[in-house]
Image: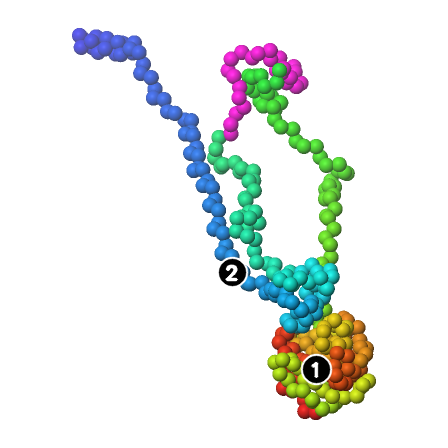
């Protein structure tokens, strides 16, 4: 009996004791780890510029003319004048340096190192939000508001002066949000029309090529007659005897690039450009029958034989390959 009383007393005392608190489990999720900041892209190494090709030039010597220089290099004197900005071909100066290539041939070399075109600067774009990063809340204060009107029964939040701190609420967030830009004018459902694009000037067509572009040219004798002076480095051509007024024929098809008497010692001269490689010249004519830039066919009558700047009636005939005189007898068919 005494044991039963003691057991009951122990149970009563145990029931009156303070209960142990239940273990508390933190259920809030740990903050998301921010991804590492993106490393700025390293600028690409500048591309290696191709070695620039030397620009061909010619230094004007005493006694030279624009026509003689153009003939020396197998060029049209008009092109040579345009490339060098020459408006008056008779105003060449001794020592003047002329470029012998079109501007298009000198372009495309790339911008100079260190220039803005060679080292374009990257244009900064809008920063993209990082995934998983917490959204920053506006700056608010937990203290009492300063002259803030009650949010209840107030359609809009007006706080003066601006930039005062107000208690944080969903409505306050809505009031401080940036309004959407107004819709573009136009009917509903219609996309705004884009501004008209600037008119692009039409490209200038390249100058037509003279004659055939084949390397080989089908030559013929410009006149029938006796060769009285063969080719030499000094003469640069052959001299063919004949009678005054004998027709001088185009030795091959091409375009007349010169028809005048501006070269001393050659009299009335006609030069035909057959392609980018070949020229032919006809000197000492009595009369010129073609005009510059005129297209001619093989065998067309271009002049009449004469003795201008010569001691007798003759035709001085030259064939030039890339401006260098060659022996016409090696290219003309047997007479």
Residue 19 as seen in the image, left or right of residue 172:
left
Q: Position of residue 95 (x, y in %)?
A: 62, 62
Residue 2 as seen in the image, left or right of residue 148:
left
- Prevalent SS, magenta region: loop
Q: What is the magenta range? A: 135-160
Residue of label 1: 317
Q: Quadrant of the C terminus?
A: bottom right
Q: Is residue 76 above or below residue 184?
A: below
Residue of label 2: 51
Q: Is residue 325 above or below residue 3?
A: below
- The residue that appears at 69% across and 67% down in the rendered structure is 66
Q: Callout 1 environment at 10 Å: few (<14), some (14 to 19), or many (20+)?
A: many
**Residue 290 visible in rendering:** yes
Asked if the stretch drawn in magenta spans residue 169, the answer is no
Q: Is residue 229 above or below residue 204?
A: below
Instruction: Label 1: state its secondary structure.
Output: strand
Question: Picture quarter containing residue 155?
Answer: top right
Q: Position of residue 21 (x, y in %)?
A: 33, 17
- The residue that appears at 52% across and 36% down in the rendered structure is 129
- The residue that appears at 66% across and 19% down in the rendered structure is 156
Q: How many angstroms separate mark 2 from mark 1 (CA)?
A: 41 Å
Question: Picture quarter containing residue 231?
Answer: bottom right
Q: Is residue 167 above or below residue 132?
A: above
Residue 236 as seen in the image, left or right of residue 284:
left
Choose between 64 and 21: the one closer to the eye: 64
**Residue 217 visible in rendering:** no
Choose between 287 and 254: the one closer to the eye: 287
Instruction: Label 2: state its secondary structure.
Output: loop
Asked if the stretch drawn in magenta spans residue 144, the answer is yes
Q: Which mark is residue 30?
A: none
Choose between 200 and 150: the one closer to the eye: 200
């Amino acid at each position: 009996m005494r044991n039963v009383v003691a057991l009951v007393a122990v149970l009563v005392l145990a029931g009156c004791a303070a209960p142990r608190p239940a273990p508390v489990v933190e259920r809030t999720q740990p903050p998301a780890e921010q991804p590492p900041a993106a490393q700025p892209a390293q600028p690409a190494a500048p591309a290696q510029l191709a070695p620039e090709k030397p620009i061909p030039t010619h230094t004007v010597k005493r006694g030279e003319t624009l026509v003689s220089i153009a003939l020396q290099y197998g060029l049209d004197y008009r092109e040579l004048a345009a490339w060098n900005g020459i408006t008056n071909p008779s105003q060449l100066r001794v020592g003047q340096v002329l470029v012998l290539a079109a501007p298009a041939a000198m372009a495309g070399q790339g911008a100079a190192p260190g220039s803005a075109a060679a080292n374009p600067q990257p244009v900064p774009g809008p920063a993209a939000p990082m995934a998983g990063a917490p959204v920053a809340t506006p700056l608010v204060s937990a203290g009492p508001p300063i002259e803030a009107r009650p949010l209840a029964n107030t359609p809009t939040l007006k706080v003066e002066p601006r930039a005062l701190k107000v208690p944080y609420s969903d409505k306050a967030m809505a009031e401080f949000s940036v309004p959407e830009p107004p819709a573009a004018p136009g009917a509903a459902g219609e996309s705004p029309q884009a501004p008209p694009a600037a008119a692009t000037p039409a490209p200038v067509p390249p100058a037509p090529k003279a004659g055939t572009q084949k390397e080989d040219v089908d030559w013929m004798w410009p006149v029938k007659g006796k060769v009285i002076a063969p080719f030499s480095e000094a003469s640069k051509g052959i001299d063919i005897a004949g009678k005054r007024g004998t027709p001088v024929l185009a030795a091959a098809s091409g375009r007349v690039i010169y028809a005048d008497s501006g070269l001393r010692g050659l009299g009335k001269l006609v030069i035909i450009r057959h392609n980018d490689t070949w020229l032919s010249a006809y000197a000492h004519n009595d009369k010129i029958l073609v005009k510059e830039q005129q297209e001619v066919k093989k065998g067309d009558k271009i002049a009449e034989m004469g003795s201008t700047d010569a001691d007798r009636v003759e035709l001085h005939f030259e064939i030039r390959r890339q401006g260098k005189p060659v022996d016409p007898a090696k290219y003309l068919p047997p007479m």
